[in-house]
Image: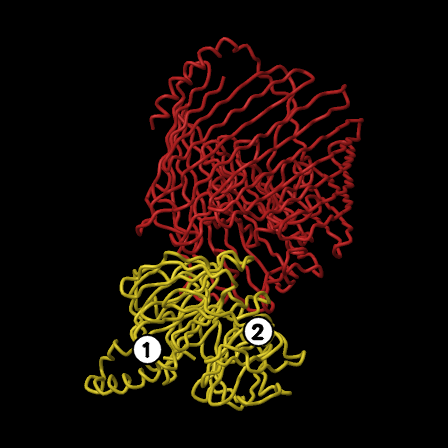
Chain colours: A red, B yellow
Amino acid sequence: MTLKKLFLPLLLLLCQTLLAQQDSIVQLKEVIITDTQLQNFSGTQSVQAINDSVINTNAASLTSLLNYNTVIYFKENGLGMVSSPSFRGTTAQQTAVIWNGININSQLNGQTDFNTITTRDFDAVTVRAGGGSVIYGSSAIGGSIHLDNKVSFGQKFSNEFRVNYGSFNTQGYHYKTNIGTDRFSASVSITRNSSDNDYDYANGGTNINGQYYNTSVNAVAAYKLNAKNRLTFYSYLFDGERHFSLIFPSEVKTKYRDANTRNLLEWAGNYGKFTSKLKAAFLQEEYKYYPNIENPGFTYGRVESVIAKYDLLFKAGEKFKINTVFDFMQNKGFGSDIINKTRHIGGASILASHNLTDRFMYEAGLRKEATSNYESPLLYSAGVKFKAATFYTVKLNTSKNFRIPTFNDLYWQDGGNTELTPETSWQAELGNAFTFGNLTFSFTGYYIKLTDMLRWVPTGGIWRPMNTDKVTTSGIEVIAAYKKAFGTHVFEINGTYGYTSSKDENTDKQLIYVPYHKGTAGLSYGFKKFSAYAQVLYNGEVFTRTDNDSRYNINSYTTANAGVAYNFGKINTYTLGGQVLNLADTDYVSVDSRPLPGRNYTMYLTIKF
Amino acid sequence: MNFKKYLIALAASVVLVSCSSDDNRDTPDISQAFDNGTFVLNEGNSNVSSASVTFIGDDGTVQQDIYNTVNPGKPGLGSYLQSMFFTDDLAFIISGSANKVTVVNRHTFEFVANVDTNFSSPRYGVVANGKAYITNYADFNIGTDDFLTVINLSDYSTSKIPLNNWSEKITEENGKLYIFNGFYGNGTSVTVFNPTNNTVENTIALGDSPDSFDEEDGILYVLGDTKLIKINIAANSVTSAIDLPENLHGSAHLIVEDNKIYFTNGTSVYSMALNATTAPAAPLFSYTSTSPYGGMYGFNVEDDKIYIAEGGDFASDSEVYTYSLTGTLLNTYEAGVGPNGFYFN
């Protein structure tokens, strides 16, 4: 804590000098998000936006944010280690992560590790449940997670600095600046997180070799060429190293490095009823795995992707929209364990939405991809929305989606299988949304039938991926939010609940690591410059065996976090907060033999100037 | 087979113990709980709780996960359980991923010691002169870094001896260690190691990568990728070899029992006379694996019974089967995840 003692006065001094620069005028005009389909073509599905204040009060990892605020289930190999979601009972490869409209799931293993995404780098995090392959391509089966940056023009200059320090020497530093004129806008966010992560286990023992650090930079710059044309550049860099924690102290210590860069240049033009967007993206992902940290040797994989996309939106008033998207992607894969290959995928989508009356709208989409690697199915989506009463809206949506084989699936040595076909799903959902004053409430039932699910199975001496399984998933999701102010006292209550039945059709057994029940609840309270929150997570028990032998189940667990914060600033914001995580000191695991921390603490200071 | 020697000793103790237990049949004596039956080693997967040992009693009773049942609160076995080996009183269980050997009393399965130093992907072990010798792969891609871990059984301290060659299965004959240098097609010899002065005395070239072996009457019968090779132990030399026809390349699980050689190929069991000079043309029998991917994951022959382990899906409990020597299914027993070996007690 000596570091912190030194650091705080320094920060305060720093701010005094910066105060003089407080001449910026914050004028929010039009806010631009490049992922317009999320707005325009998601009307018949369940979309949950997670607001800034929730992002800021949660820990920096995307795992923690979504675990405590959505129905998505996570399994985490210990705090900060590999984290895989299961959304609507699907696998980690069946949830797409979309960064400013671009699917950033790994081309190597098909999934996003949710502990390699720092939420503070984004202005909005949105969870779009259900099928989305028509818009977002591979993996949007359980749903998609959208990480967006907002662009707005107008004179502004604002800065935010945040530092947090907590148990296990967990440190976080975050700086963000926004600069804008009438024609130019830029925002840059830099985040650094690190932790010794050497927490004690409840049954004795310590989390050995769990340390990690990561640094990320997210930048957006936009320039208005003229009244009709705009150039925007998005860039996201992530560099991190994690040691993988041990179960037995005698295991070999390993570590893993991720280095990802994502760059996107967009030329947008507004020509009356037409909005045209030409996008070029260059993405690079690389991992290095050190099978023994004592040795310099490592294995690695790298994929360089170039994406070109043309997106044309036609709006006939506000009632009718039609959107065509043509895209082309080249992925070049390299690695110590894969055959170096280049893959090309071309795709075309057409999306339409029509507000027939004030109460009734429908939307539909089609997408077809072409590639030489496998047969790609025709993807579709169709839905209707009807506002049956002022307080009640019903939505119905059906879609066909897919998850394509990854570079590892196709080209891993030894075992890669070039004869694979994509996993395909047919799915339907019925959503009911209610609004009673300050209470919003949604109740959604869904059904997913998945065929050709890929699984790595031992074939003789080696493991190979095969299109073996068929899975039928059905479930319900409830999302509720309530907000009420009594004078200067503001209360907000949020809750989610998911019931998930996800069965292997051959065995009629529940998939492993898919809980039947998951629930979250959050309560926040604000009074003038004081705020407090509490959140609770319930994860039902999960099977770890495909035969559902209950002897080996991972027990259900309930964990809670709570925190308080106070804003000391008069003109600027100086928010000092403290949090207690795992309030009840629950002894729990989300993955077999991988204990998560007991009660632990974090303090943070946020300064806006 | 090495532990046959112990079986003789055991047979004597069984007689003794069974006499004493007659007096109190109501409370089974834990001291001989696992003396009459077969241990099935269940390899497990990346979840450590999936690794276990199943016991099939000679009376047909089956007990799952005997280690954790007998030893609550003791250190876990680790996972990817590779193999077991024995002394008269001890059983050693090797975990490839946890880099450790768990030592238990072979009669009661009670925890004795947790040995977790000087290992790197341990594979197989044997006991000679009061010490246990365990082969280690270290880096799976490199043969020259393979080594032996030596456990001093008086205090369970360990030390390392470099071997500079692919090192897999190991046995002890006439005070010498025979280390088979085959690893999925790499390595084509047998190393003869003298444990009294820790030196390699001889390297017997096979011209083929050894998969499995058994010993009978001073001869090591070694099953390679393409040949069945006989080594005279006294002379430490190859005396003869039978070329296997193409359909028998990549065979596995050689066992010598009652003057017959047994081995497997795919889900078929083959047998031939010890002195046969040609490979068998047809299998003794074949069985239909209930799993498309994990057939014949473990195999052994003992007391006129053929034991076959089904790997299953490696994510749930699987089964083992016993067959008569003519290929009639005798029994099906439930086992754990990925059963890979049978050890007779």
Q: Quick one: A573 or B293, which is closer to the camera?
A: B293
For the residues beneath circles 1 and 2, the answer to whether they share a chain is: yes
What is the x, y in percent for residue B202? 49, 70
Q: Name which residue type carries label 2.
A: Leu
Q: Quick one: B293 or A601, which is closer to the camera?
A: B293
Pick the quarter of the image with the C terminus of chain B: bottom left
x 62%, y 87%: residue: B278
Quadrant of residue A569 within the rendered picture: top left
Quadrant of residue A198 within the rendered picture: top left
Q: Is mark 1 on a helix, strand or loop?
A: loop
Closer to the chain start, of discs 1 and 2, is: 1
What is the x, y in percent for residue A373? 75, 54
Q: How crowded is mark 2: few (under 14 residues within 10 Å), some or many (20 or more)?
A: many
Pick the quarter of the image with the N terminus of chain B: bottom left
Chain that bears disc 1? B
Residue bearing the label numbered 1: B34
Q: Quick one: A561 or B225, which is closer to the camera?
A: B225
Report the residue that reaches farthest toward the left.
Answer: B23
Q: Is mark 2 on a helix, strand or loop?
A: loop
x 45%, y 19%: residue: A573
What is the x, y in percent for residue B242? 61, 82
Q: How far apart are marks 1 and 2 (CA)?
A: 39 Å
Residue bearing the label numbered 2: B206
Q: Quick one: A436 or A242, which is closer to the camera?
A: A242
x 38%, y 74%: residue: B175
Residue A465 to residue A64: above or below = below
Residue A346 to residue A213: above or below = below
Can residue A543 be seen at all in this image of the molecule? no
Chain that bears disc 2? B
